[in-house]
Image (cartoon, rainbow, N blue to C red):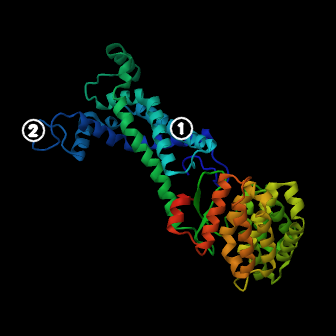
Amino acid sequence: MVGYDPRADGRNVSNLEVAVAGSVSGLVTRVLISPLDVIKIRFQLQIERLSRSDPNAKYHGILQAGRQILQEEGPTAFWKGHIPAQLLSIGYGAVQFLSFEVLTELVHRASVRDARDFSVHFVCGGLSACVATLAVHPVDVLRTRFAAQGEPRVYKTLRNAVVTMYRTEGPLVFYKGLNPTLIAIFPYAGFQFSFYSSLKHAYEWAMPAEGKKNGAVISPNLGKSCCSWMVMGEPRREEYKMQSFDAATQQLLKTALKDPGAVDLEKVANVIVDHSLQDCVFSKEAGRMCYAIIQAESKQAGQSVFRRGLLNRLQQEYQAREQLRARSLQGWVCYVTFICNIFDYLRVNNMPMMALVNPVYDCLFRLAQPDSLSKEEEVDCLVLQLHRVGEQLEKMNGQRMDELFVLIRDGFLLPTGLSSLAQLLLLEIIEFRAAGWKTTPAAHKYYYSEVSD
């Protein structure tokens, strides 16, 4: 993904890596398109029409121009001015990509707009291109002078060109044509970055990865001024978020997924639960991994050691939920996310596990208490989990869902202690349920600003 993404899986690449990637892409592109660039410049500088009917026209077609240049000047002519052109491409790519990354991250840090918004990518893309143009425009002028000259050459070397141009035309020669270049490059690069991002998100939304969990789930994002779409497509079976584990634990989990009989499955259950209470990213993913291990164990040995160990740990943490919340708000939010994730994935006869219905409800009721609604982390968790499992929970126990939404409505009407973001999230989930756990066109227009991954 180009640009800063605060919700990217794993780590965001460093600024150095972004600059190197931009430089390499510019280098390779320049090598490949240099012959066409030379022909383009020759066409632009030819006063006569590009037509066979004009006897004074030296060039009148791409193939003819290519043959003519090859015959008169040799194959190296197609790479005239290649050194300044490469400096241009490498420098431009590095500055543009690095500037875009820095600008989108600054937008995110300022919390003004979503860093992945279409308009943000347009403005940041245009500004990054302008910054890159300012940095390398002198090299672009040199590249154009070299590519335009035929035989005999006006400039023998790069150094000779710089000195000659400076002495005869002054320092501003290196910024000739800057104004129209900036005017043209801003919308060009802005639309390039913004359409790339939007089309990528649209493709991922329309063509999610294969699995049981395809579809769009609306996910309000904490810390943003609005909400956004989130595609809950299941990645390929072998892809799980294990990057934050050490090497030995990663190997343990991989073995459990492929050959559960070869490892201590109670230990595996404890590892997954412990890590889910510490890592919110993993807690959103762990249900799928648990489901895969349970399926593998059932097929291999017809046993349920892992499942029993997992449910026992969930029960222990559920009984100590108030202590967990008092000790660590993040750990508490991770636990609720994890148990809802497990409820969503673990099925009996294609139905959610009844043993988890009341514990999940109790956790959501705790999140709907006044002291929890004053904390945006808990409000965000409450709304996100209701988007994920609310419809299933209501089918299992509609009366408790009614009671839960009485609390949510009362909380929304609290005179003080509720932030504007929390009010927005609560109002959105109230409308979402009222519409039959679907988003109406009016609600979508009001609450959601973009399609994102």
Sequence-wise, which precedes: disc 1 or disc 2? Answer: 2
Quadrant for residue 290, please give it. bottom right
Residue sitting at 32 percent across and 43 percent down? Answer: 36
**Residue 210 place in picture, x, y as percent:** 58, 72
The residue positioned farthest toward the front in the image shown: 415
Q: Are marks 1 and 2 in contact (CB under 8 Å)?
A: no
The local secondary structure at tag 1 comes to: helix
Q: Is residue 418 above or below residue 314?
A: above
Q: Which residue is mark 2?
A: 55
Answer few, some or many: residues within 10 Å of disc 2's Cα (few below 14, many 20 plus, some between 14 and 19): few
**Residue 332 place in picture, x, y as percent:** 81, 60
Q: Is residue 358 left or right of residue 180?
A: right
**Residue 90 place in picture, x, y as percent:** 48, 36
Q: Which mark is residue 99?
A: 1
> 126 or 41: nearer the eye?
126
Q: Is residue 42 left or right of residue 447?
A: left
Quadrant of the image containing the C terminus: bottom right
Q: Nearer the viewer, mark 1 or mark 2?
A: 1
Q: Is residue 432 left or right of residue 162?
A: right
Asked whether the viewer can see residue 284, the reply is: no
Q: Is residue 165 left or right of residue 361?
A: left
Mark 2 residue type: Pro
**Residue 28 place in picture, x, y as percent:** 46, 43
Quadrant for residue 422, please give it. bottom right
> 247 or 243: nearer the eye?
243
Whole-angstrom CA distance, mark 1 to mark 2, is 49 Å
> 210 or 103: nearer the eye?
103
Residue sitting at 36 percent across and 30 percent down? Answer: 179
The local secondary structure at tag 2 comes to: loop
